[in-house]
Image (cartoon, rainbow, N blue to C red):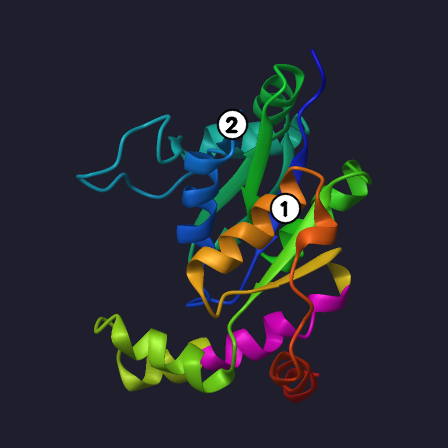
């Protein structure tokens, strides 16, 4: 049995990364989304072991001390981390594993797994990203402004990734990601001039 491929997918909030990752799992055989450990409280609709592995802070910090995470971070007073053993188990079974993490987590994973494939998902423009954030109808103007600033910061790190995919059309972006994961990278679309400008604005 051939070993699976470890793939990092990062993006600014609103670029559609999570939806694309879920669609990839449903459309590419033997592809799974890594389930992170977290210390935050479980929401009513969430399932332990499916959405997250929910653990308490003492248990999480014990795992840190034992070096059990590929990467971890503390966000808004809660820990989030990727178990090295869980990822390795899936890879050894021949499954591709998607890591839905930010650029800081990506740096940590690359130190431990140099051969990891990394993809950064971009919105087609800053205007479209803002439109999508507003379209959620759940954030205040202050939160939207904060997310736009965070997006600019995240996009400055695009050069640290092996591949860039633009989510201007969901099905096409999914096809680009599928080509990368299946080793047919040459089938991806070239980046447009608009995206080049977007990256220049964020530099």
Which residue is the site of mark 1? 179
Q: Is residue 112 above or below residue 201?
A: above
| Viewport quadrant of the N terminus | top right
The front one of 184 and 26 is 184
Whether the magenta-drawn stretch holds residue 154 is answered as yes
- Residue at 76%, 67% (x, y): give it: 159
Where disc 1 sits, the SS reads helix
Q: Is residue 57 above or below residue 198?
A: above
- Residue at 57%, 42% (x, y): give it: 99
Q: Which disc is residue 29 wearing? A: 2
* Left or right: 138 in relation to 142: left
Inspect this view and state whether residue 68 appears: yes
- Residue at 66%, 16% (x, y): give it: 92
Q: Counting other residues with Cα less than 10 Å from the Cα at mark 1, is it few (<14), some (14-19), or many (20 or more)? A: some
Whether the magenta-drawn stretch holds residue 72 is answered as no
Distance between mark 2 and mark 1 Cα atoms:
13 Å
Q: Position of residue 14 (x, y in %)?
A: 41, 68
Q: Counting other residues with Cα less than 10 Å from the Cα at mark 2, is it few (<14), some (14-19), or many (20 or more)? A: few
């Amino acid at each position: 049995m051939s070993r699976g491929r470890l793939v990092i997918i990062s993006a600014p909030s609103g670029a559609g990364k999570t939806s694309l990752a879920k669609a990839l799992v449903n459309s590419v055989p033997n592809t799974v989304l890594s389930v992170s450990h977290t210390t935050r409280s479980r929401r009513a609709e969430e399932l332990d072991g499916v959405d997250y592995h929910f653990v308490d802070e003492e248990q999480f910090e014990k795992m840190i001390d034992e070096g059990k995470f590929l990467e971890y971070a503390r966000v808004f007073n809660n820990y989030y981390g990727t178990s090295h053993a869980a990822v390795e188990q899936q890879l050894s079974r021949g499954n591709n594993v998607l890591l839905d993490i930010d650029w800081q987590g990506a740096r940590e994973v690359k130190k431990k797994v140099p051969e990891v494939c990394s993809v950064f998902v971009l919105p087609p423009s800053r205007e479209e990203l803002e439109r999508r954030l507003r379209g959620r109808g759940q954030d205040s103007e202050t939160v939207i402004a904060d997310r736009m600033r965070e997006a600019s910061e995240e996009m400055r790190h695009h050069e640290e990734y092996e591949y860039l995919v633009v989510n201007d059309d969901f099905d096409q972006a999914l096809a680009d990601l599928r080509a990368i994961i299946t080793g047919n990278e040459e089938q991806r679309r070239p980046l447009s001039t608009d995206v080049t400008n977007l990256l220049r604005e964020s530099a």
